[in-house]
Image: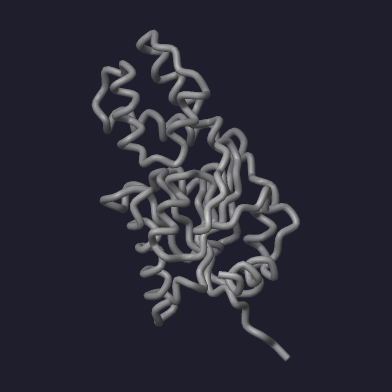
Amino acid sequence: MHTSPAVHAVLWDMDGTLVDTEPYWFRAERELLAAFSIPWSDGQAAELVGCALPETARVLQRAGADLPVRAIVDGLVDSVVTQVRQAVPWRPGARELLGELAAADVPCALVTMSERPLADEIDRLLPTGTFRFLVTGDMVSNGKPHPEPYLRAVEALGDDLGAPLDPARIVAIEDSLPGLASARAAGVVTLGVPNVVPLPENPGHTLWPTLAGRSIADLNDLVCQN
């Protein structure tokens, strides 16, 4: 007898969760500031993980980057896109879980603070239709940790499927503090998979050390436990 999954949709963060591009962002920030003879450490870069790109740009301005916010954002995105075209560092277990979700017809959306050019680069490397919808940083007025990105994804998937989705049966997968806060505020089941930045225990989210070896059964259990 066929039983439908308890999880009705999965919302994926991109940088650091689906692909290990955080080192690419660190390099982009470091090279941008080097043009102004300003040092930039990995520790400083780590503080920006998960932030909306305009906020990152403003931090870099305060550090001494004498450029408009838009020019900084464009420069960072262009740098990371160039690096992704050379090598895509997939996070352990991410593509395998995506494939299992697709085979079970569980809809997925990408919810990232990266802008559309980079999201499209990653999306085109996956089987067509892997993501039903992409929410990118340039599509929202309020970036993570505001709930708007995840609320937008939930609404878009509901429209695509022709019926509203129950947030309690949607899982968001994140690797950053702003991302976790955004997902929790949107009311979806929130899963943290740490990467560059350690994630604290919190009753509002679950932590897994990795997606490697994880399956839909694990996501179903997660939904049932929340």
**Residue 119 horizontal/vertical position (percent):** 46, 48
The quarter in which the C terminus is drawn is bottom right
In the displayed image of the protein, which residue is found farthest to the right?
213
Residue at (54, 74) in percent of width and height: 8
Is residue 109 rendered to the left or right of residue 67? right
Residue at (60, 49) in percent of width and height: 193
- In the image, residue 159 above or below residue 15: below
- In the image, residue 217 above or below residue 94: below
**Residue 194 horizontal/vertical position (percent):** 60, 44
Q: How is the image coloured?
A: one colour
Residue at (48, 33) in percent of width and height: 80
In the displayed image of the protein, which residue is found farthest to the bottom?
1
**Residue 107 horizontal/vertical position (percent):** 53, 70
In the displayed image of the protein, which residue is found farthest to the top?
37
**Residue 167 vs residue 205, the one in the foreground:** 205
Is residue 196 rendered to the left or right of residue 140? right
- Numbered marks: total: 0
- In the image, residue 159 above or below residue 177: below
The quarter in which the N terminus is drawn is bottom right
**Residue 28 vs residue 142, the one in the foreground:** 142
Residue at (64, 44) in percent of width and height: 90
**Residue 148 horizontal/vertical position (percent):** 33, 57
**Residue 29 vs residue 160, the one in the foreground:** 29
Is residue 72 rendered to the left or right of residue 98? left
